[in-house]
Image (cartoon, grey):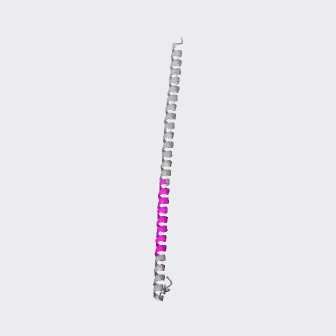
Amino acid sequence: MSSCKPVSFSRRTLLHGVVVVVVIVIVVVIVVVMVVVMVAVVVVIVVVVVLLVVIVLVILIVVIVIIVVVIVVLIVIVVVGVVVIVVVMVVLMVVVMVVVIVIVLTHSLP
């Protein structure tokens, strides 16, 4: 063991080692940047899809509410119309009965 000699590298070998390390670092940085960009793109796509789904659901809810309101208004209009028709018919019947009674009473008097 005491006969080991120190190892020496030439400048060219050291320069090649440095270049290899720099290239590896650059490749790792590029890969990390690409992964970060891909994750960011996926997050943006997910957020956009979620927002679109929420917007569509809100629009559907608004449309359903409008349809329900229109149906309720139509039902109210129909009910009010029927009530008005019934009241008018009752009033007309009463008027006709009063007219008939008055005619009968006036003609039956001596």
Spot occupied by residue 61 in the image (x, y as percentages of width and height): 50, 48
* Residue beneath the point at 46% across and 76% down: 24
Spot occupied by residue 15 in the image (x, y as percentages of width and height): 47, 85
Q: Is residue 108 placed above or below 46 in the rendered structure?
A: above
Q: Nearer the viewer, residue 104 or 62?
A: 62
Give the dominant element type of the magenta stretch: helix, strand or loop. Answer: helix
Examine the structure image and report whether residue 71 is included in the region drawn in magenta: no
Spot occupied by residue 18 in the image (x, y as percentages of width and height): 48, 82
* Residue beneath the point at 51% across and 26% down: 90
Q: Residue furthest top?
A: 110
The residue stretch that appears in magenta: 26-53
Q: Is residue 71 placed above or below 14 in the rendered structure?
A: above
Q: Nearer the viewer, residue 85 or 38?
A: 38
* Residue beneath the point at 47% across and 63% down: 42
* Residue beneath the point at 48% across and 41% down: 71
Q: Nearer the viewer, residue 34 or 59?
A: 34
Q: Nearer the viewer, residue 75 or 66?
A: 66
